Image (cartoon, helix red, strand yellow):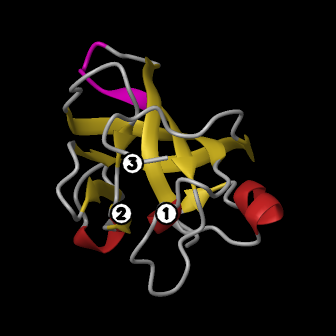
């Protein structure tokens, strides 16, 4: 998945980079806001490698890693916040849509299982990846 810059930071820690391993959105912040309503979006997410045939993923007893990924020149952002906890994203997708030739858009981000996050962006870069100090804070996630 070469569409996300610096993904080797994740590969170094986990042995692979797969956006489907993103299990929760922990924090988001807006950066580089310009007058034309474009901005960068920083997401701090929780990852847990998804095993084959992952009926019980994410595993509440398993380890999680935090990752910050920054999406540049975001458009059409939709994030529904339903409380002060992490947002579960069971089907997180970062899709390369560069071939569609939409002006200034190279990525489509969404959750194929209907989690409340969707947007388009020009590009994305990983800033850091490290073991999470704590697991998800989510009332519907059993520990």
Residue drawn at 75 percent across, 64 percent down: 14
> Which marked residue is nearer to the observer: mark 1 or mark 3?
1
Residue, far bottom = 53
Residue 139 coordinates in the image, percent (x, y): 34, 34
Relative placement, left or right, of 82 versus 121 is left
Q: For mark 1, what is the residue?
A: 19
Q: Position of residue 4 (x, y in %)?
A: 55, 58
User: For the view shown, which residue lies furthest in the right direction?
Assistant: 12
User: In what element is the residue under mark 1?
Assistant: helix
Q: Is tag 3's residue or tag 2's residue first in the polypeptide sequence?
A: 2
Query: Tag 3, which secondary structure?
Result: loop
For the N terminus, which image quadrant?
bottom right
Instruction: Give the image quarter of residue 73.
Output: top left
Percent from the top left, x then y, of residue 48?
Answer: 58, 59
Q: Which region shows up in magenta?
A: 35-42
| Above or below for 10 versus 135 | below
Tell me the distance, in whole angstroms, between the alpha carbons under discs 1 and 3. Answer: 17 Å
Residues under labels 2 and 1: Cα distance?
6 Å
Q: Say whether marks 2 and 1 touch (CB < 8 Å).
A: yes
């Amino acid at each position: 998945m070469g569409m996300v810059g610096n993904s080797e930071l994740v590969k170094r820690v986990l042995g692979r980079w797969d956006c489907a391993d993103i299990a929760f959105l922990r924090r988001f912040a807006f950066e580089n806001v310009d007058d034309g309503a474009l901005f960068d979006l920083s997401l701090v997410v929780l990852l847990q490698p998804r095993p084959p045939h992952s009926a019980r993923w994410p595993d509440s007893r398993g380890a999680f890693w935090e990752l910050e990924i920054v999406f540049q020149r975001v458009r059409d952002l939709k994030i529904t916040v339903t409380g002060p906890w992490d947002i579960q994203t069971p089907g997180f997708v970062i899709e390369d849509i560069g071939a569609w030739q939409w002006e200034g858009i190279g990525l489509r981000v969404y959750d194929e299982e209907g989690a409340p996050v969707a947007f388009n962006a020009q590009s994305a870069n990983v800033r850091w990846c490290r073991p999470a100090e704590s697991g998800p804070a989510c009332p519907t996630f059993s520990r």
